[in-house]
Image (tube, rainbow, N blue to C red):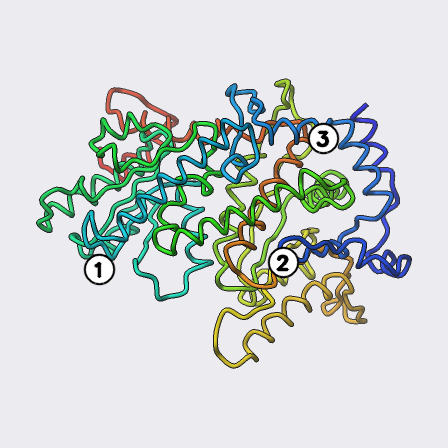
Amino acid sequence: MTSDRWQSLRALPLSPLTHLFDADSARVSKFGLEQAGIYFDFSKTHLEDKTVAAFAELADEMRLSNRVEALLSGEPINISEGRAAEHCAERGIGSPASVDNAQALHQRMKSLVEIIDSGALGEFTQIIHLGIGGSALGPKMLHQALKLGDEKYELEVVSNIDGVALEPILERFDAGKTLLVIASKTFTTAETLMNARSVLDWMREEGVADPLGQVVALTANPEQAVEWGVDETRILPFSETVGGRYSLWSSIGFSVALALGYEVFENMLAGAAGMDQHFQDSPWDQNIPVLAAFADQYYAQIRGCETRAVFAYDERLGLLPDYLQQLEMESNGKSVTLEGEKLTLHSSPIVWGGVGTDAQHAVFQLLHQGTHLVPVEFLAVAEAGDSLDPAHHNGLLLNCFAQGAALMAGKESDDSHRNYEGDRPSVTILLEDLEACSLGALLAFYEHRTFVNAVLLNINPFDQFGVELGKQMANELADDDGNRLDASTEELKKRAFGA
């Protein structure tokens, strides 16, 4: 039946965007939805009433309501690993026991923030946060988006095992005033722990008598952190049912809460909770994450689009495309269904993007005149984040809005080199202001959108076994016990390390 539903979707007529606007004077109000101070404009996508209705029928067939309920109530929806996915419990929606546990752990985090702020553990002015994947991307993105420049602590987030990422920070920081935060769900992450040992070595070399006394651990495996040497009073646990790329709502957000103030963290949780409630309560045709997923699946399955581009017209959101790459491609980059059968649909799009207006002078040539059809997502903030001449921000916004209009309208020319076909889709997301509450809502929107896409594809978005294979092979290469890979890889190893 599901394959028939996809066939009926593919059989719908393909109307140009300009025709859709001409045929429906209410299109902007119908496909422009608002939540938590964020306006989502889906009107420049090819969604129309009959398309949305057909996708709503598919959603019902895939039991989307039941899957949403299972997610938000803490059922073991991650079937391949036999556990729940309880990031929403961190925001107050989930099983009562999980919500209570999350609140207790948040209170523990708040207490540690207050203790550090008081100077009881040392006169810290700098923070090095070590993690990888969601343990680093989330905090780094949040800090860049929300920092004001006059914070009590200077925060640096390092994820790469490449020493070039860490060494300049060590050269600049004061070891005696540096708090080391180690974020690892299992507390066995090789890259993170190698970086941590290097920071501790640096502290010792700089004369710090007890480097481990300047460490805070964020982990779902506190026993391993204690074994590693961290004082149990400086370990902030979080639940095993909170996945890494969904973990910034948990203790993983500690460094940001410390650097920017715990109230910022609380406001972010509140914004996300509001989007959770909207997602839970709204009908499909008025449900922002669901409509976004309908558009995603329309372009992936009906139009054959393999990528989606995200451009933040605000320097503060410059890391958002990176964050979304992990969220979407790690979640939905799968090739089998929930039943373990081969997936016959396109899975996650390749997510890429950058910052406007820089991108206009680089990749937008392809978007306007290339042969690839690429759905584009624009993000902008109505309130300026700077105090310079308003012409700066006005120009930024006008460029953002003009790009979406130009992609849709195109421009005919007798000179084929100057011809723009148009009919190229985009979504614009406009925040009233960039602050913790609206950013929390925005990130929760992306999480739920990713989940709905997974339900429509009938895949599990909460495991990530594909991350492990390369790491396993790296370990095999490191073990000099006769393990050999292909001839090409062995030649590279020989050239890099010698015979």
Using the numbered discs, state the Cα–Cα distance from disc 3 to disc 1 in whole angstroms.
52 Å
Please report the residue visible at 79 percent of the width from the left and 71 percent of the height from the top: 413
Give 412 or 414, whichever is nearer the viewer: 412
**Numbered label attached to residue 37:** 2
Residue 364: x and y in percent read: 62, 62
Give the number of the mark in front: 3 or 1.
3
Contact between marks 3 and 1 (CB within 8 A): the answer is no
Residue 401: x and y in percent read: 68, 67
Quadrant housing residue 201: top left
Quadrant housing residue 457: top right
User: Upstream in the sequence, badge 3 or badge 1?
Assistant: 3
Say above or below: 67 vs 354: above
Q: Amino acid at mark 1?
A: Arg
Please report the residue visible at 41 percent of the width from the left and 45 percent of the height from the top: 253
Q: Give neighbour class at mark 1: few <14, some 14-19, many 20+ (Cα, 10 Å).
A: few
Using the numbered discs, state the Cα–Cα distance from disc 2 to disc 1 in whole angstroms.
39 Å
User: Upstream in the sequence, badge 2 or badge 1?
Assistant: 2
- Locate residue 135 relative to residue 235 in the image: left or right: right
Residue 249: x and y in percent read: 47, 42
Q: Amino acid at mark 3?
A: Ser
User: Upstream in the sequence, badge 3 or badge 2?
Assistant: 2
Contact between marks 2 and 1 (CB within 8 A): the answer is no
Q: Secondary structure at mark 3?
A: helix
- Where is mark 1, residue-wise? 172
- Where is mark 3, residue-wise? 65
